Image (cartoon, helix red, strand yellow):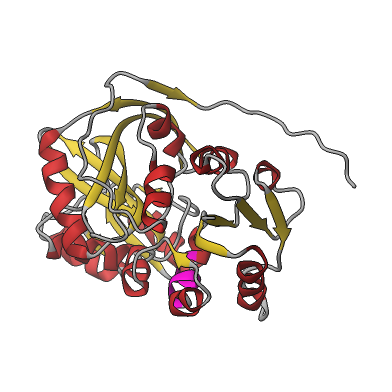
Amino acid sequence: MTNLLILSAGTRNKVVEYCREAMHGEGIVVATDCSPYAPAIYEADACEIVPRIDAPDYMQTIFGIVKKYDIRGCFSLIDPELSLIAKHADELRELGCEPMISPYDLVETCLHKARCAELFKKHGLATAKYYLHPTEFDMDHAQEGVDFPVFVKPEGGSASLDIHVAENHRELDVLFAKQDGLMIQEFMNGQEYGADVYVDMISGKCAAIFLKKKLKMRAGETDKAVSVHDQALFDLIVPFVEAAGFRGEIDIDLFKDGDKWYFSEVNPRFGGGYPHAYACGVDVPSMLLRNLRGEVNPPAAFDYEDGVVMMKYNEVMIRREA
């Protein structure tokens, strides 16, 4: 039995459903959350309410769940937990559970925007200019470098929280006076895209890429998008993810300005728009389970259909409180 644990499932019902479908009765899906009002946990075969991830006994609770259900693989759906799981990867493996995540140092790099930008540059990929202090920006601005407007965002933030656009120096100074840990980033005017990428856990080779053109964003997630192909971009992504050492599912944010691709961020987890990829036949849960069974996934074929539109809408789950 290849039992799977999905941590911090929250409202990601579809990911839980897809994993259950991929099981084909050969294992169970267990989902956790710190709240009993997280609807996704009730889509699993079993669920557990756990402490918050910053609780001192959190990992011991997870270890207990791994033993209780004989879990063979796990992954988290929220950024704050990714480093925690990667940091305890060896302890999970000792229990027979493979964390489906990239190495700890790489996860930490992805969760810090400046470090992620340096990773892109190391691999020869274009990315927006950034500055960790207003004086750095002022020097470049004075030399006719990056001009206003600019993005101002937390260097270690996630889910597009606390992102602002500064139109002038006064707004820039006000934002930096209010909050620590900010960075300034060049404003990108190009079209925004997202790539769902799966890197084989065993071979380290890219097993899937799904590219979507973002039509509308809401609360930091893709609300509407359309599937597209771009071989020139695929030729950039494949060597990058393999050489950098990524593993499992990752979500890449990109901009295209003219004919040039700019890499913005990497989220080392399932992105919020993954259901779009699944609907187009990019079955990552099956790839993930294949790896857990010791099988290598074939190289990516990019054989999904263009012009398939995803449009998110609200659903509700009704359950008795008991």
Position in image of residue 293 (x %, y %): 40, 56
Examine the residues drawn in magenta and state their main secondary structure. Answer: helix
Give the image quarter of residue 320: top right
The mark tally for this picture is: 0
Query: Left or right: 28 with respect to 267?
Result: right
Residue 13 position, x and y percent, is 60, 40
Whole-percent x, y for residue 298 in the image: 23, 45
Q: Name above or below for residue 163 compared with residue 213.
A: below
Q: Is residue 158 magenta?
A: no
Residue 164 visible within the image: no
Which quadrant, please, contains the N terminus? bottom right
Q: Residue at x 66, y 28 (%)?
A: 315
In-front residue for pair 267/86: 86
Q: Residue furthest top?
A: 307
Q: Which contiguous range is marked in magenta?
A: 82-87
Where 280 falls versus 174 (above or below)? above
Looking at the image, residue 284 lies above or below residue 230: below
| Residue displayed at 71% across by 31% down | 316
Q: Is residue 83 magenta?
A: yes
Q: Position of residue 272 (x, y in %)?
A: 47, 42
